Image: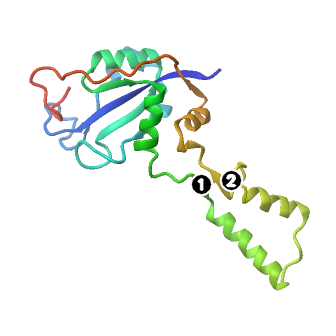
Amino acid sequence: MATEVMFIKVRIYRRTMTLDPRRLKGQADFPPFAELPESDDFDWGNAWIGHDQKESLGTGRDYGQWLMAATPEFATAARARWPHLIEILSETDAAAFYADRCSCHDAEILVDHDVVASIDAMVRLEAAGVKAVPTAAEQAFRTAALDPSTEARGIRTNTKKTLAGLLTDRGTTAKRDVATTPLASPPAGWRPGEGR
């Protein structure tokens, strides 16, 4: 059974000061998700989907906006705890953010250059008469390797280019009927990078 997830967009600022000696100045200031009781059985390996590659709120890739797929319980608890840092996104808004910001630089077609170069070398040897005509199995391998719609090594379609493809690869589905909840105003006296 596929796991049902909700999408949250997390604002992450660059830490400008810290009172905790274990948290270094200049690093990304992530919300302390481990404080939430819902994080105990949370699948962190599949949680982080991508980050905003176009605009950061500081310098470097660790700052800015990150997209997460979380259980509905975790998403609502995180939003309640940090409403000024976490937005809950509808599936449509999450897919748009993923396409426009997270996977915007990813290739639609993935090429395994070793396999393609090997096929090219074999074809050249056959054309020069050095190698015999390929067997049916070799020809079937070449056809599959050069067809982007197959899963064979060679040329493949990047299934993780879209959010729907990424969710399918991970075996998750999006929770339906979720409305986008925008960021709330930060608490009085709060400044980015000075803790939560």
Q: Is residue 13 left or right of residue 160?
A: left
At x 63% / y 60%, what residue is drawn? 112
At x 19% / y 38%, what residue is drawn? 15
Q: Are marks 2 and 1 in contact (CB under 8 Å)?
A: yes
* N-terminal-most mark, 2 or 1: 1
User: Eyeballing the image, is 170 above or below 82?
Assistant: below
* Separation of residues labelled 2 and 1 (CA atoms): 7 Å
At x 28% / y 35%, what residue is drawn? 12
Residue 36 at least partly seen: no
Q: Amino acid at mark 2?
A: Pro
Picture disc at residue 109: 1
Marker count (numbered): 2
Q: Amino acid at mark 1?
A: Ile
- Label 2 neighbourhood size at 10 Å, few (<14), some (14-19), many (20+)? some
At x 49% / y 33%, what residue is drawn? 45
- Label 1 neighbourhood size at 10 Å, few (<14), some (14-19), many (20+)? few
What is the quadrant of residue 184 in the picture? top left
Closer-to-camera residue (134/157): 157
User: Can you say which quadrant of the picture contains the C terminus?
Assistant: top left
User: Eyeballing the image, is 38 above or below 92?
Assistant: above
User: Eyeballing the image, is 86 above or below 140?
Assistant: above
Which residue is label 2 attached to?
148
What is the quadrant of residue 17 in the picture? top left
Where's residue 41, x and y in %? 47, 20
Where's residue 36, x and y in %? 35, 17
Q: Is residue 119 left or right of residue 181?
A: right
